[in-house]
Amino acid sequence: MQATFHKKKIYVPKKIIEKLHLEDGDQVDFTIRSEDSVELRINRKSSGKDLLLKGLQNPRPIGVKGSLRRREIYEDIDRR
């Protein structure tokens, strides 16, 4: 199968897109091997599900450094 280069864009046939499971937002990296040879690498976009799973695997620390007393928590309420 061949892609077409036209007006500074490469048009990829639908069969190739389907075979590679390309989706909007995926990036294709080109590595030039020689004057007439190129290697393609697909960098898939991260879906919301992937980002959520990554965040759950590496959670950010939360809370306060040191100790916090009850009085400090309710300090603003007492001033009202």
Image: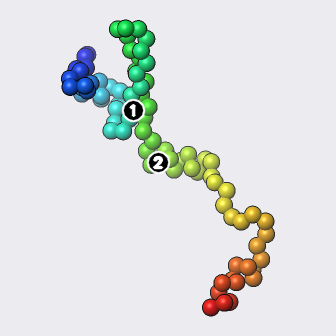
Residue 57's place in the image compared with 61, above or below, is: above
Q: Secondary structure at mark 1?
A: strand
Residue located farthest toward the top when viewing the structure as drawn: 35
Q: CA distance from mark 2 to mark 1?
A: 19 Å
Residue 24 is situated, as x and y percent measured from the top left of the image, at 33, 38
Q: What residue is at 63 percent from the left and 54 percent from the top?
A: 60
Q: How many marks?
A: 2
What is the quadrant of residue 36 in the picture? top left
What is the quadrant of residue 10 in the picture? top left
Residue at which label 2 appears: 49
Q: Quadrant of the C terminus?
A: bottom right
Residue located farthest toward the front when viewing the structure as drawn: 8
Residue located farthest toward the left when viewing the structure as drawn: 6
Residue 12 in sight here: no
What amino acid type should be assigned to the residue bearing mark 1? Gln
Q: Secondary structure at mark 2?
A: helix
Q: What residue is at 35 percent from the left and 27 percent from the top?
A: 20
Residue at which label 1 appears: 27
